[in-house]
Structure formats: C-alpha cells, structure tokens
Amino acid sequence: MAPPRILIVGKMGVGKTTVSEALIEAPMTADDSCRDAKKPYEYIVHRSSAWTIIDTSGLDGISNNEVSISQALRNLHGLLQESMGGYHAALFVIRAGRFDLSDTAALQIFASVFAGLRDRTQVVITRCENDEDWLEENHGFCQKFFSPQLGVLPRERFVCVGFPYIKHVKTDRDRAQETIFAHERAESADRLRAFVAGIVSRNAEPTNCLSSASLKPAALLHQLKMMLIQIHGLDKFDRKAFAAGVRGAHLPDFDDAAIQHALKG
C-alpha cells in the first residue's frame, strides 16, 4: 500500500519545510523563511516509508516580480497535476501571532483551489515554542480567521509546534541552550507525527480534491487570474501582461481562446 499523501500549504516563510522534515524524520535545518526559494506554486515531493509529503512553496502569490506569470502558471499546472492523485489530509501552516493579509490570501487560494480538502484540513501553528498556551488564549481569534473558508474547526484540528534553533553556536551558553532547543524540537516533531497519524487513521483513502476539469486550460487560467486579483487587487490586474505571460508558458492548449475565456470569466 502506498504511503498516505499529505499536502502542506501556507504562505512563504511560516515553517512548511521544517514541518515536512519533521514528518519524514529528516534532519531539521534552520527556519525555512530563507529557504522557501520565493517560487510561488512550486512544490517538492518528500517521500518516506510513512508518508508522501507534497510541500508547496508560498500560495500567497506572485510578489515583487520574483516569479513571472509564465513560471507561476507552469508551477501551478504541475502542482495540480500532482494533486490529481488526491490527499489523505492537508496541513495549513501558519505562524503564531497576528495573521496578516498574506495569510488571508494563502487561505483563500487554498480553499478555492483545493475545495475538496475542506473537511480534511488541519492547522499547524508554528513558532509556539515560547508560548504553549497560545492556542488556548487565541482559539476564538483562530476560529474567526479560518471559519469563513473552512467552517468551524474543532480544537483537535489544531496543533502547536516549535522548532527553535541557535543559528551560530559559539559559546558554552549557546551549546547549553541548543541542547534545550533540541529537546523542544524533538517533542514538537513527536507531537506533529502523532497528530498527522491520527488524521490518516480517520481517512483511510485519499480524497479526490480536484476534478479533471480543474486542469482544463480555461479553468486553470481563470484560477490563476483570480489568484492575481486576490493578491494584488482588481485595479492592478493587467490583462495584457496576463495574456503575454500565459503565452510565454508554452503549455499545450493554452491558446488565445482559453485566454479570452478566462479574461471574460
């Protein structure tokens, strides 16, 4: 039997890759805020005997011209093709604190593209190593944030984790603190794996979160257009740049008719 498939999503820099490493029991490196490669909609598949993890890059969009529309479309197309196999669960990763507009954009995009995963989405809150009571204190706030897209989430669909590091261990004090941090990382990794194992035990089969229609050019282009509008605003959506970017992706069947259909939708 193939290992359960887990989709990991969230905006850039919240700890998605560290969560993936914890699940597959790989050596965890420093916080991934600088490792997300700034390539929206890109994904990496991590495989172990226990899980197949599809670790996405940021779903909060194309910003600061980091990735062209053409590359974003190729990345998104590949991610959706990978997703046709379905998922046992999705982990929406978010950093403890006051959630911002990029968190909102990532959640809206996720809920729109992967609507079939609504009932299988769990929330992983990172950077909780110094505040174990954060979720209890902010559960109402979390519900207000997530419920418009995912409905009311019971407490058991949240988990708090922390993977603190000292980036440069130079002194005895650093080494002592890093020993404490290593213990905290191990505890969080164990808690996270138990959390995901519980999810998978309730979802024996992957859910087909996408239909074949989702990969049709007109539907995919419409989704990319809506992402751009959500991220940048309707007044900043450039129809000509969008059309040029789609043509530059050189994907089969993404012709002028599909572009015009998406622009009208």
Image (tube, helix red, strand yellow):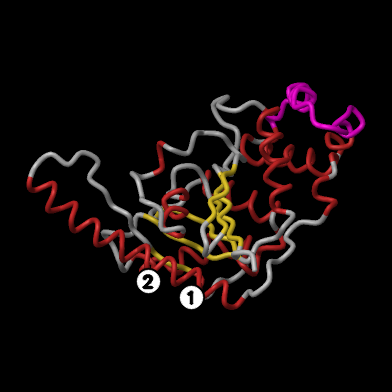
Residue at the image point whose x is 52% and y is 65% from the top? 50
For the residue marked with disc 1, what is the amino acid? Glu
**Count of number-bearing discs:** 2
Image side of residue 175 versus residue 17, left or right? left
Kindly report the secondary structure that dominates the magenta region of the rendered protein. helix
Residue 64 shown in magenta: no
Question: x%, y% of residue 5?
Answer: 61, 61
Where, by quadrant of the figure, is residue 247 drawn?
Answer: top right
Q: Secondary structure at mark 2?
A: helix
Mark 2 and mark 1 in contact? Answer it, CB < 8 Å: no
Question: x%, y% of residue 166?
Answer: 22, 45
Decide which of tag 2 and tag 1 comes sooner along the chain. 2
Where, by quadrant of the figure, is residue 58 drawn?
Answer: top right
For the residue marked with disc 2, what is the amino acid? Glu
Q: Quadrant of the C terminus?
A: top right
Q: Nearer the viewer, residue 157 or 77?
A: 77
Query: Where does the magenta region start and end?
Result: 235-260
Residue at the image point whose x is 41% and y is 58% from the top? 25
The residue indicated by pointer 1 is 156
Q: Quadrant of the N terminus?
A: bottom right
Question: x%, y% of residue 168?
Answer: 20, 38
Residue at the image point whose x is 62% and y is 40% from the top? 41
The residue indicated by pointer 2 is 136
Q: Secondary structure at mark 1?
A: helix
